[in-house]
Image: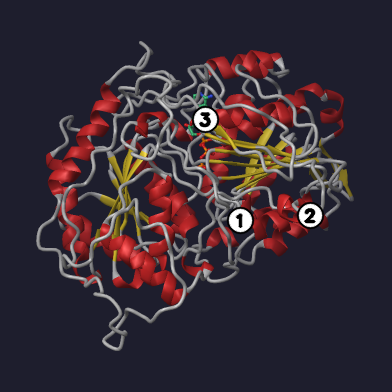
Amino acid sequence: MTWEDDDFAPESAHRHHTRPTRPTYIPPHLRTINPHYTSPPQHSRSPYFPEPTPFRRPPLLNPSGSSSSRRGGRWRRGGGAPRGTDAPRRSPAPRFLPPKHYPYDDLSEKLDELKVVEEDAVDGASSKGNAINFEAYDDIPVEASGENVPEAVESFGEIELSEGLKENIRRCKYAKPTPIQKHAIPIAVAGRDLMACAQTGSGKTAAFCFPIISGILKNENWVKVAGSGRRGGTRVAYPSALILAPTRELSCQIYEEARKFGYNTGVKIVVVYGGAPIVQQFRNLEKGVDLLVATPGRLVDMIERAKVSLSMIRYLAIDEADQMLDMGFEPQIRKIVQQNGMPPAGKRQTMLFSATFPDEIQRLASDFLSDYIFLTVGRVGSSTDLIAQRIELVQDIDKRNHLKNILRAQRDNEPFGKSSLTLIFVETKRGADSLKHWLSTSGFAAVAIHGDKVQMEREQALKAFKRGATPILVATDVASRGLDIPHVSHVINFDLPKDIDSYVHRIGRTGRAGRSGLATAFFSDKNMPLAKALAELMKESNQDVPSWLSQYAERSFNDVGQGRRYGGSKFGAHDFRNDSYIGNGNSDYSSAYYGGDSMVDSHSSPTRVGYVSPTFGVRADFYGPASHGTGFGQEPVVAGGWE
Ligand SMILES: Nc1ncnc2c1ncn2[C@@H]1O[C@H](COP(=O)(O)OP(=O)(O)OP(=O)(O)O)[C@@H](O)[C@H]1O
């Protein structure tokens, strides 16, 4: 079984992480409400990103369990277990009580906020365009380390991209680069290897596609040699660029995006992924391919059948790179990158992207890179501040009713006839089918997607969801990464994942590209070990942490230690190379800037000073037609919303 065929159940390789001390980054739109933030705001808060309304409902636990989200940041080691009746009575334990009263009014408030955001025009931009709200932040933490880091740019015009690509960027209505694009594209265009981290929905796909497509176009002679040829009677594809992604759906999405960017340029783009008829994919390859997008399992299959050769690869991009190198899939990636004739690091250009990048994975990944630059835009492993997060204490037995009530409240609150989309994550494939069935019989049109579904079913489910025909999608983690579905306004973690990175990616299916989003999680006693990481993440994202969660966080830390399996903080991940350099006198690495305060490590010299300014926010267009349609003779793309 290949890994794109399976759901992701991160049972292994969870490791210990330490969290560097950094001043808390407060986005401008929240600064006025943070009592600890001293610098004055640089500009008035954007009307399009209103302050999250604090959730006023008291937590569903006994009143003795009070703690402040702002005060709950100190974790003590040691101590006894709170679970079960044998727990030592050191302090009053927060008790799970069945929810008596659901905070639906809060939910309505949040959804109201979202609607305001969605309805307002941004800078007079067309509701159909990909208008970016550049006032969403005026600064964002950026860290770039490595030697001779190329300068960031403020506009696409400043970057040496091929003309055909620039034309397509205009067609896509990408008026300005997003922060990750401002930094990553110049680095990549300069031919440097790159390990890049940026928050979910912040435009990483274009950040690796643009340099690759431009590079292919600039090296047309190379392209002529690549493409396809014959070996021993069979036709072999010789792509010059390879993009690897973990799931079939994400591969297809990247392919569609790349096709938009490569439109009318002559760059041949092909996708291969498991579950779809291989013969058709052979045929596509035989027509020649410059840029191949692939899932690892199907690609290995193609290589073994001598349908693809990697010997001409010049550009390699791995999306969701941390996941691609975690969970036992590393051998498959090594096989592709190191054992099948691909030019070695240094002879090819390698770019790794993700929103989360733990040190251990960085260490593994560095095998594939040469003299690379480590770039983080936004806090690594952090969720975007555009997502309002709610954590509710709900026991397993109560979850379905609780969900039904939330969905009902949401539906009652829909003013436009067409519902916004709700993505519900569950733990197991069977759980997904069962919940989908129950929702359908309870009057909520739902579809399910998971690794046991045949590809056709997966595609149909996703399509129905995107169109809004079935506005609820119940999914396992197979849908947690990368998928860009613009109208997802609410992500519900019916079952919380076991590690915090999965949570970050799951909730990142909303609040994308500058839009606001809402993420609700049902926290049951099973999730106790995730409490600490969850509370920290919420604090990092300027969310109000329920006092009961802060209490659990302290307890789970004491009981479970920092086991990575259940979270283990990865926040503030940084170039792991700095760890080894600190103290040995090497000063080549590291610069880090958070909000207004530069934090230059005394052991290192800065390679870049300043903020990304301005940054990024797309005018949300909930109920409009496809906002990503290219309008130049292509099928609507995957990211097209209501197709
Ligand atoms: N410069 C830009 N201007 C306008 N829209 C953009 C720009 N760059 C990207 N987008 C849009 O932003 C959305 C999110 O981009 P993308 O899917 O690449 O995010 P991501 O960072 O890869 O997210 P994830 O971490 O979830 O994979 C897409 O709909 C994309 O079309």
User: Residue 379, can we see it?
Assistant: yes
Which quadrant of the view contains residue 286?
Answer: top right
- The residue labelled by disc 3 is 596
Vertical placement of 460 versus 264: above or below? below
Comes first in the chain, label 3 or label 1: 1
Vertical placement of 593 versus 297: above or below? above
Q: Does dot 3 land on a helix, a strand or a loop? A: loop
Q: Does dot 2 land on a helix, a strand or a loop? A: helix
Q: Is mark 3 within 8 Å of ligand 1?
A: no
Which quadrant of the view contains residue 177?
Answer: top right
Q: Position of residue 295 (x, y in %)?
A: 63, 51
Q: Is mark 2 within 8 Å of ligand 1?
A: no
Comes first in the chain, label 2 or label 1: 1
The structure residue drawn at horizontal position 34% and vertical position 34%, both measured from the top left corner, is: 516
Q: Is residue 463 left or right of residue 171?
A: left
User: Residue 443, can we see it?
Assistant: no
> Which quarter of the rendered picture does the C terminus lie within?
top left
Quick one: 498 or 216, which is closer to the camera? 498
- The residue labelled by disc 1 is 358
> Which quarter of the rendered picture does the N terminus lie within?
bottom right
Quick one: 284 or 614, which is closer to the camera? 614
Label 2 Cα crowd, 10 Å radius (few <14 / some 14-19 / many 20+): few
Label 1 Cα crowd, 10 Å radius (few <14 / some 14-19 / many 20+): many
Q: Amino acid at mark 2?
A: Asp
2 or 3: mark nearer the eye: 3
Q: Position of residue 372 (x, y in %)?
A: 77, 42
Label 3 Cα crowd, 10 Å radius (few <14 / some 14-19 / many 20+): some
Q: Amino acid at mark 1?
A: Pro
- The residue labelled by disc 2 is 367
Q: Amino acid at mark 3?
A: Gly
Comes first in the chain, label 2 or label 3: 2
